[in-house]
Amino acid sequence: MALGLAVTGAFAQDAPKEHADQPQDQYVGSMTTLGELQVEIPGRKPGDPVMTDEEFQNATTIYFERCAGCHGVLRKGATGKALTTDLTRENGFEYLRDFIVYGSPAGMPNWGTSGDLSEAEVDMMARYLLLEPPTPPEWGMDKMRETWNVVVAPEDRPTEKMNDIDIDNLMSVTLRDAGQIALIDGANYKIHSIIDTGYAVHISRISASGRYLFVIGRDAKVNMIDLWMEEPATVAEIKIGMEARSVETSKFEGYEDKYAIAGAYWPPQYVIMDGDTLEPLRIQSTRGTTYDEQLYHPEPRVAAILSSHYRPEFIVNVKETGKILLVDYSDLKALTVTEIDAERFLHDGGLDHTQRYFITAANARNKLVVIDTKEGELEAITDSEGLTPHPGRGANFEHPDHGWVWATSHLGDDSVALISTDPEGENAWQVVESFYALGGGSLFVKTHPESNHLYVDATLNPDPEISASVAVYKIDEMKAGEEPEMIVLPIGEWAGIPEGQPRIVQPEFNKAGTEVWFSVWNAKDKVSAIVVVDDKTLELKEVIKDERLVTPTGKFNVYNTRADVY
Ligand code: DHE
């Protein structure tokens, strides 16, 4: 759509050549919950551009939902540049307007020429950036306790499993835009329950006991769901902030499920809760200095959180400061936190096959960071040799020539990297193979101890056919230095959905490792599905369709998630 912008005089910048933002440019935190915040224009100053309160409110919503993920909630910068008024006023309205229209090859989407924002919205946003940003409220113990609700007290819960569900083979499926999860039977594919959770629900994690499901919404609402009840249901809930992405429970021997933890994007903090009731016990801010420039950062977001199997510690990724925190929960009154300098823009990650080493992507810097969770120290930092690594939990397998490796795919290019996970080997933590997958925009890779296949999605690839397919590689046929044969599964075609542009996201195995489930993620008002593939034959086994399956994305098999099988 040609944008008929009446641009007076020369551009404030040369209009960049044709701009099409890359998958990794779209895949950034969207503060959808903050977008609903009611705000007022902070401290108007003489010379401020004219902006009605209503415009300021609308501009704030757009900013939180589309810009804050890169530029920060307070506009201090994150993976994108700072947009504080000292800078924006120096550049001026025209410069800001053109930048929003055309974007930049450095990763700023072309909001105007792509049609994502109208001419009036572009104009409004350029004026908005000349004003001071609103600061969302903090979310301390007072607000947490207000939202904390024990629906069924521990003493009133069943003392034995009251249903005949094979919990270990149950799949918790994120129904992202419905704000629900579906509990689907791993054997007969029947939906046991649909449970309301937080807004734009994100991920599920499982208690060490395998009995409780912990689900977090992007609105930072945590639901604790009892899978033993006749009808699985929420037994406790709490809102730990305004934006969040991660939740976990304690897994170290003697502390199993004693505590739960959840980490927020806003406010930048994590909270340790009672593992039985979600009572908030200790809130820790992550505000502090960046590891490299030692500059204060006002909103370092909590990204992935994992539980150590070697120490009574939570492993907490802090995105903007580039620090990995080892939070020792053995004494909450004298909390010991080991703060490890890692790399900025930490995101997701998983354990190696021994479950000792945590391997995580600092994706905006194309790095992989390895933490020794037994010794509690940095083991290695390595280049992923691709653009924007996005491992999810990653994939561990024994390569015929390289031995044990851990795989990640990339958002920014079509490569899959295998790093050696033999700590004594000559290539320890180095990339030993890099080969092609379907194309950029991959989000998740997966394999299973019982499988001979590595699966790689291409969810955010701009080509509809590619984003509706999955690449598969036979592990036992991989050879050092050779491109492994890529088998392409037309998952979207198998789903038989005529409308929309369904994207295939996140392979997930059943407990036995004999089946792989793929989400066929379509728009909210279109039909989605889950496709089940036989891992041995790579043939279609089942298509699960149900009008309740609205925007299915992440799927979490209870046993595989609880036991950190991946
Ligand atoms: Fe996620 C994991 C953040 C968008 C599906 N996602 C994670 C983790 C983080 C994160 C920090 C690791 C959690 C952990 O291990 O504790 N995700 C973000 C974002 O900031 C981002 C880029 C944009 C946003 O606004 O949220 C984002 N994520 C998405 C999606 O759009 C996905 C594809 C679909 C959806 O449901 O939202 C999505 N994210 C997932 C899944 C996992 C995940 C399925 C868990 C992977 C696993 O195997 O553990």
Image (cartoon, rainbow, N blue to C red):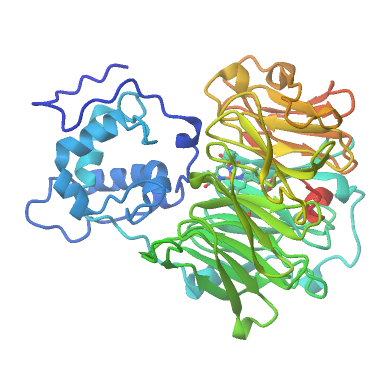
Q: Quadrant of the N terminus?
A: top left
Q: Is residue 32 left or right of residue 527?
A: left
Residue occupying the far bottom of the picture? 333
Quick check: 120 above or below 283? above
Evaluate whether residue 121 shows in this view: no
Tally of numbered tags: 0
Residue at image location 82% in from the left, 37% down from the top: 401
The quadrant holding residue 185 is: top right
Quick check: 226 above or below 203? below
The spot of residue 522 in percent (x, y) is 60, 27
Q: Is residue 422 left or right of residue 86?
A: right
The spot of residue 287 in percent (x, y) is 44, 67
Q: Is residue 533 left or right of residue 376?
A: right
Q: Is residue 397 left or right of residue 391?
A: right
The quadrant holding residue 386 is: top right
- Depth order, front residue of 370/452: 370
Residue occupying the far front of the picture? 426
The spot of residue 298 in percent (x, y) is 38, 64
Evaluate whether residue 259 shows in this view: yes
The quadrant holding residue 541 is: top right
Residue at image location 69% in from the left, 31% down from the top: 456
The spot of residue 427 in percent (x, y) is 71, 47
- Depth order, front residue of 525/65: 65
Residue at image location 54% in from the left, 60% down from the top: 342
The quarter of the rendering in which ligand 1 is drawn is top right
